[in-house]
Image (spheres, grey):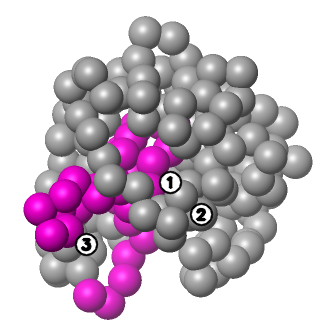
Amino acid sequence: MEYLVTDKAREHCKQHFSDSEKSGSKFNAAVFPSLDSILAAIKSIEPKRIVEQSSGRFAHVYELHGYCGWSGVGKRADYNRIETEIRNGFITEFAVVESLPQTRLLTVISEFIDGANTLITLFPGDYAPPFPYDGMMPEEKEKAVLFWQENILLKMG
């Protein structure tokens, strides 16, 4: 599948590469050194799963043949050391871990803008709902609240 990449999306995706100090999923630079290398790799494959969000966005979950990086989401109950950081303008919690689990899954969030399948973000790992926000549809917000009550971002530390 092809995606249009804006400068804003390109900047946002930088947090998912291994040189970022933000919590969450990270791509293996030896496999995917850049956003463009990821987009080239998935251009000719179909998503394993598609999740439609109420905002008009879609999550495309791809399963790759080898691992593409490390998943940055875990079960909150498994971790004791919880910290906070500013992420995309919001205060978010994360658990400090010694290592992140490897993943073969890759999730792309996109939306159709002016007829183009426009990239919003992408990250290694399975689909996770967005953090809850006031503009969400009630059912989607409830699912997001429940997900993030049970799960937490992970950060190597």
Task: Judge whether 110 appears above or below 65 on screen.
Answer: below
Numbered badge on residue 142: 3
Residue 126 is one of the magenta-drawn residues: yes
Task: Judge whether 85 appears above or below 30 on screen.
Answer: below
Please give the residue where the numbered disc 1 appears in the rendered image.
151
Mark 2 is surrounded, within 10 Å at the Cα level, by few (under 14), some (14 to 19) or many (20 or more) other residues, namely few
Please give the residue where the numbered disc 2 appears in the rendered image.
11
Who's the residue at 63% across and 72% down the image?
87
Q: Residues under labels 2 and 3: Cα distance?
A: 29 Å
Q: Are marks 2 and 1 in contact (CB under 8 Å)?
A: no
- The three-letter amino acid code for the residue at tag 2 is Glu
- The three-letter amino acid code for the residue at tag 1 is Asn
- The three-letter amino acid code for the residue at tag 3 is Glu
Horizontal relation, residue 24 to residue 127: left or right:
right
Of label 1 and label 3, which has the lower sequence position?
A: 3
Residue 69 position in % (x across, y down): 61, 29
Horizontal relation, residue 112 to residue 38: left or right:
left
Q: Residues under labels 2 and 1: Cα distance?
A: 26 Å
Q: Residue furthest left?
A: 115
Residue 68 position in % (x across, y down): 56, 24
Who's the residue at 32% across and 53% down the image?
4
Of label 2 and label 1, which has the lower sequence position?
A: 2
Horizontal relation, residue 50 to residue 39: left or right:
left
What is the count of numbered marks? 3
Closer to the camera, 10 or 24?
10
Residues shaded magenta: 107-135
Nearest to viewer (mark 2 / mark 1): 2
